[in-house]
Image (tube, rainbow, N blue to C red):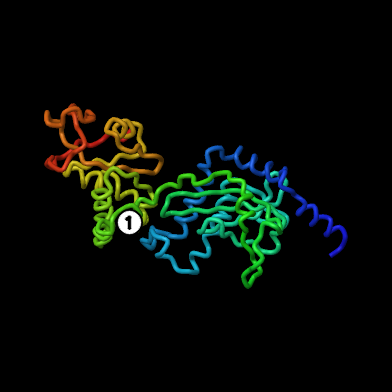
């Protein structure tokens, strides 16, 4: 190792506890590009969904993946974060952000990022996410020797010690991740949904059993397991028309549907989301229950005692 290399390495490792200007600059750049974390969260959600590949496999849980597949999630997150923010390639690390080389590290266990020897002294963008908890975190830390555990694995990769974990500057800590709604359903509901051989009938069953929950396009794709999966939701043969006689409405990302959801106290569907609910025509016994007007009649959320009755077709505007 020549003198110039030694001086560069020393400069990398010379950060003291009083601060790390390069880290602060990188943090400011990421926060400027993504003030609320929605872009970062979207990249993580896409990475998990790509790995599960529900449309072609019907999988929606981490434990349904093979061990070799699980090992790829960090790579997918690294790629999708770079695509989302258009980070340049680093000179020796994954990214170049605000003039600094930054290595992206993911671990499904918070704090257990595996740090190779070549990343020592460099900035790390450390990421954790849990589909089960619908949460994620991302922070920055410099991999200084005193912040690393002494032991390593066969590849000489080390983890952060207590001081290292405490040194992480969190950009987003325990932030919400778009929910994988299938993880919130009971086993009997899941069994009932996937018991049908027909993709259309599986989607029908989904909206019958997941009322009042946001259902993403990815969930529909996982249940339908067909190419034109959103066709299974629409009118003209999809669940909207098939469940209409039973009083089920399926709200989508339309302005009028959002107003209906707000009026009834339901979650408002976001882009690509749907929310189902069974309605009943308002009667005196419904008292002051929230209601909406459809086809000149007032409707409320149906209760167990309300009989099934056909509901009007919703406007798609």
Q: Quadrant of the C terminus?
A: top left
Task: Give the left or right position of residue 293, taking residue 174 as reference.
Answer: left
- Secondary structure under the numbered disc 1 in the rendered image: helix
Q: Position of residue 227 (x, y in %)?
A: 37, 56
Residue of label 1: 223
**Quarter residue 255 falls in:** top left
> Measured along the vertical axis of the image, is residue 31 above or below residue 185?
above
Task: Give the left or right position of residue 17, taking residue 219 as reference.
Answer: right
Q: Quadrant of the N terminus?
A: bottom right
Q: Residue furthest right?
A: 3
State how many labels appear. Answer: 1
Residue at coordinates 32% horizontally, 44% vertically from top-left?
A: 213
> Measured along the vertical axis of the image, is residue 158 above or below residue 110?
below
Callout 1: 10 Å neighbours few (<14), some, many (20+)?
A: many
Q: Residue furthest bottom?
A: 154
Q: Nearer the viewer, residue 64 or 203?
A: 64
Q: Residue furthest front?
A: 162
Residue at coordinates 34% horizontally, 58% vertically from top-left?
A: 225
Task: Give the left or right position of residue 135, taking residue 266 as reference.
Answer: right
> Measured along the vertical axis of the image, is residue 164 above or below residue 298?
below
Q: Position of residue 283 (x, y in %)?
A: 12, 30
Q: Nearer the viewer, residue 258 or 16?
A: 16
Residue at coordinates 36% horizontally, 61% vertically from top-left?
A: 58
Q: Position of residue 263 (x, y in %)?
A: 28, 30
Task: Give the left or right position of residue 39, taking residue 250 as reference.
Answer: right
Q: Nearer the viewer, residue 148 or 219?
A: 148
Q: Position of residue 37 (x, y in %)?
A: 53, 42
């Amino acid at each position: 190792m020549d003198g110039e290399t030694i001086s560069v390495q020393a400069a990398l490792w010379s950060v003291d506890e009083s601060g790390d200007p390069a880290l602060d600059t990188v943090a400011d750049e990421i926060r400027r590009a993504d003030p609320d974390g929605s872009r970062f969260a979207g990249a993580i959600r896409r990475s998990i969904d790509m790995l599960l590949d529900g449309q072609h496999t019907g999988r929606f849980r981490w434990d349904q993946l093979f061990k070799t597949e699980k090992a790829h999630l960090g790579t997918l997150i690294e790629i999708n974060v770079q695509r989302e923010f258009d980070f340049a390639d680093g000179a020796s690390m994954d990214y170049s952000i605000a003039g600094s080389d930054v290595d992206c590290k993911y671990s499904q266990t918070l704090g257990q990022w595996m740090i190779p020897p070549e990343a020592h002294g460099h900035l790390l963008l450390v990421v954790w996410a849990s589909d089960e908890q619908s949460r994620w975190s991302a922070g920055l830390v410099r991999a200084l020797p005193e912040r690393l555990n002494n032991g390593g694995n066969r590849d000489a990769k080390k983890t952060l010690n207590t001081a290292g974990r405490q040194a992480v500057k969190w950009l987003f800590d325990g932030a919400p991740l778009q929910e994988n709604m299938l993880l919130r359903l009971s086993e009997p509901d899941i069994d009932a949904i996937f018991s049908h051989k027909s993709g259309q009938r599986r989607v029908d069953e989904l909206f019958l059993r997941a009322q009042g929950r946001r259902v993403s396009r990815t969930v529909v794709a996982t249940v339908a397991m067909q190419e034109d999966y959103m066709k299974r939701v629409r009118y003209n043969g999809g669940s909207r028309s098939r469940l209409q006689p039973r009083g089920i409405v399926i709200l989508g990302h339309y302005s009028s549907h959002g107003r209906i959801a707000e009026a009834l106290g339901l979650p408002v569907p976001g882009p690509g989301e749907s929310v189902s609910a069974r309605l009943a025509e308002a009667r005196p016994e419904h008292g002051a229950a929230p209601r909406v007007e459809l086809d000149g009649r007032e409707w409320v959320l149906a209760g167990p005692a309300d009989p099934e009755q056909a509901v009007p077709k919703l406007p798609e505007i």
